[in-house]
């Protein structure tokens, strides 16, 4: 799927330089911060390939996170740059799944996936509008 | 002021055991987390001496932070306990100032102060209701 | 496994009251914070059932996180209490897996699992000392 | 002092686009994150005007934060860009003070200052090496 998405040019990639405050007493980035890196990447993906996430927020809609998986392969240290590549893995009526690859100066740092459901401000699941869903589906690797 | 507040029993004290994720690559609690400790302490103070902060939130009011000052005296490490003592320093028509003393296993860790303005959800400054203000003013050390 | 662990009394449970700074603009706890809740819970588990994690830190060993999975079932809001229950799911020569159940005032909030490898300060994987491994293995539900 | 530093070209400016995870349930950036913005800015300043902070870290030296002051003037929201400008305010034998101006799309967001002491990994205060101190002193506005 990754290679498919890459082939069709529907990934986004954000570069993040590790600030000191993201490190922990092991001397490396605390693992919880990777989950935040994923969010930065998928919000960029929406902007580059779909539409700015702030438009969903303005319409009182959110893509609530329903699942997170991260496999940690290598540590990252203060001041190193992490490149987070993201693409859409699948989309359904009210939910979608994004996949991620994180790379640091020494290669692969982590792989990850997140799943999301569209919700309103009361937290009720809402169908993704047909035009939005079809546009995102067209970004899937074939 | 501190001693006055302590004399009149209008302080609150919260004990916080340092989680690993609050440490940084210096091996100590990252200094930005102290600002979060202050928030935990003043929310406890409101509950113990005034009324639960969630009542302000439910009424669409917030005590927006308008100033923070922290003097760092000693580091704190993973798994150590920090005791944060808080009291009201002054209160005016729409704002108030809280003062803090942080102590760890080896003594004084930091002193701090925060100032807050009552705002509505649009961010407009609102007068603190007279009864709330008078009740809080009665907690000031004399 | 859960029920087994619960039956044999080898879970730990930590209660965490949600501070304001853990919420996000959706009005609920940001999903990345759940990963931090897991850490608080498993460090308590080590203390209650194995030995204080600070002893590993003092010996320049860390249980580096190699995998995180979280399934989010329900939001949690400011000032609500989350109970995080944790138990050991398996242990091998140099790694182990913990499982978690998070409950809020309205029931199940999330389920999660984390995997860890014992590493030295250079990040090299090290075997878990035999006595430590056997003691932890004895905590597994049968 | 600000105008002096600006005149002599010894400020640095970092642009930070607000990620969703830095917002809170008031719908704005949580005030504790501003303290982290300051760190990003002064580390860039060291790199642009002095030398990369990672060289201090590699030499087992840190500029421990001894004081933080922030005045909050305006909220910042998700996806807005904050420009953090930083300059050196004074430098002494073992300590220095940085000043900051934060600007968002609608103008001034905050002003701030931080003080730092050079310490070794045991936390002992160490004199700033003469050549480093003199080089930084030359950056002060006159």
Image (cartoon, coloured by chain):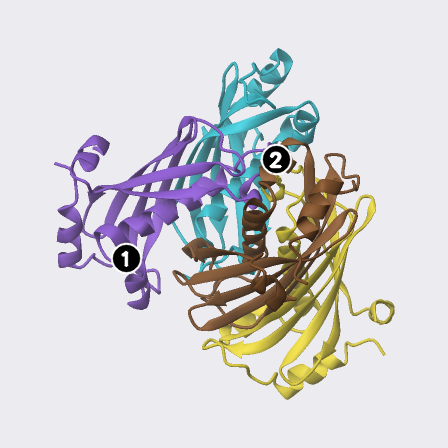
Chain colours: A brown, B cyan, C yellow, D purple
Which of the numbered marks, if any, corresponds to residue A55? 2
Residue shown at 28% from the left, 59% from the top: D52
Quadrant of res A73: bottom right
Q: Which mark is in front, 1 or 2?
A: 2
**Which residue in the protein does label 1 denote?**
D125
- Read off the chain for label 2: A
Q: What's the chain of the residue with tag 1? A: D
**Badge 1 local density, few (<14 within 10 Å), some, or many (20+)?**
some
Where residue C50 appears, as percent x and y from the top left, is 68, 74
Work out which residue is located at the far bottom of the displayed protein and give it: C130
Would you say residue C20 is visible in this rendering? yes
Q: Please report the residue visible at 65 percent of the width from the left and 37 percent of the height from the top.
A: A56
The crowd level at tag 2 (other Cα within 10 Å; few <14, some 14-19, many 20+) is few
Quadrant for residue B122, please give it.
Answer: top right
Q: Which of D4/B35 is in front?
A: D4
Look at 28% across and 48% down and name the residue there: D45
The residues tagged by marks 1 and 2 sit, at their Cα atoms, a distance apart of 50 Å
In terms of secondary structure, where does tag 2 sit? helix
In this rendering, would B11 be left or right of A28? Answer: right
């Amino acid at each position: 799927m990754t290679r498919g998405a890459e082939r069709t040019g529907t990934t986004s990639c954000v570069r993040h330089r590790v600030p000191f405050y993201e490190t922990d007493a092991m001397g490396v980035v605390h693992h919880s911060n990777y989950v935040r890196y994923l969010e930065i990447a998928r919000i960029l993906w929406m902007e580059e390939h779909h539409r700015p996430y702030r438009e969903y927020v303005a319409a009182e809609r959110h893509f609530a996170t329903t699942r997170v998986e991260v496999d940690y392969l290598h540590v990252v240290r203060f001041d190193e740059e992490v490149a987070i590549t993201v693409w859409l893995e699948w989309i359904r009526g009210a939910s979608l799944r994004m996949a991620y690859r994180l790379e640091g100066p020494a290669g692969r740092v982590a792989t990850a996936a997140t799943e999301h459901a569209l919700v309103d401000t009361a937290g009720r699941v809402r169908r993704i509008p047909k035009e939005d869903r079809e546009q995102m589906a067209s970004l899937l690797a074939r």
